[in-house]
Each structure stands twice: as structure tokens, then as C-alpha cells.
Image (cartoon, rainbow, N blue to C red):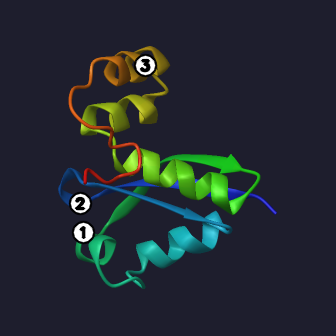
Amino acid sequence: MPFWTYMLHCRGGAFYTGHTDNLEVRLAQHERGWFEGFTSKLLPVKLVWCEEFPTRHEAFVMERRIKGWSRAKKMALIRGDWNLISALAKGKNGPSTSSGRTE
């Protein structure tokens, strides 16, 4: 069974990143506002990026990594601009946010 990491573009320009084992169902749930919180307050949402992974763990790890990225790096991922992603990774200052946490 494949698992997916995905990114949604939300009203107001915000991005939401998540993971799931059924991308079609999860997108429909987001679009209908079934999840209280971030995306339900920022409808409509649009899928702008997704990638398939063989395990839930790998999908979750990628979700957490992306959540720690800057907006510029997320936009480069959406465009598939691997050179810019690499340059942005090399040019960062401060603590790593690859886990999505800064403490």
C-alpha cells in the first residue's frame, strides 16, 4: 500500500503539508472542510504537490521535513526546482528545522 506526502495551497497563500494512505479521499475531506483547524478555515484548498512513498514512516518524515522549510523552499519544491532547493538548504543559518521544530 502506498503512502503520500502532499502540499495544499490554501486561501490567503498559506501552505498545508500532510500525509495519508488515500490521497483522493484525504483531498476530498480537506475540500469539504471535514478537518477542523487550519485548512477548514482557509478554504478553498488546491493540491500543488504530492509524492508517493512505500511506507507511512517515510511519508511522515517527509511531511515533517517540509513543514520546517521556508516558503521559498516550498515553492521551489512545487516547481520541481531542485537546484534552488539545494541552494536554499546550503544557505540557511541557525538551527536545523528539518523536523519542523526549532527547540
Q: Could you tell whether 96 is left or right of 12 in the image?
A: right
Q: Is residue 41 above or below residue 3?
A: below
Amino acid at pointer 2:
Arg
Residue 28 placed where, x, y %? 52, 74
Q: Is residue 50 above or below residue 21?
A: above
Within 10 angstroms of label 3, few (less than 14), some, or many (20 or more) residues?
few
Residue 76 placed where, x, y %? 38, 28
Residue 30 placed where, x, y %? 44, 73
Q: Residue at label 1?
A: 42
Tell me the element at label 2: helix
Q: Measure the C-alpha gap from mark 3 to mark 1.
A: 30 Å
103 or 18: which is nearer to us? 103
The C terminus lies in quadrant? bottom left
Res 11 label: 2
Tell me the element at label 1: loop
Q: Earlier in the sequence, mark 3 or mark 1?
A: 1
Name the front one of labels 3 and 1. 3
Q: Earlier in the sequence, mark 2 or mark 3?
A: 2
Q: Residue at label 3?
A: 86
Q: Quadrant of residue 89?
A: top left
Name the front one of labels 2 and 3. 3
Residue 56 placed where, x, y %? 67, 62
Residue at the limit of the structure toward the right, as seen here: 1
Amino acid at pointer 3:
Ser
The N terminus lies in quadrant? bottom right
Is label 2 in contact with label 1 (beta carbons under 8 Å)? Answer: yes
Q: Measure the C-alpha gap from mark 2 to mark 1.
A: 5 Å
- For the point 28% across and 72% down, the residue is 38
- For the point 44% across and 33% down, the residue is 77
Tell me the element at label 3: helix
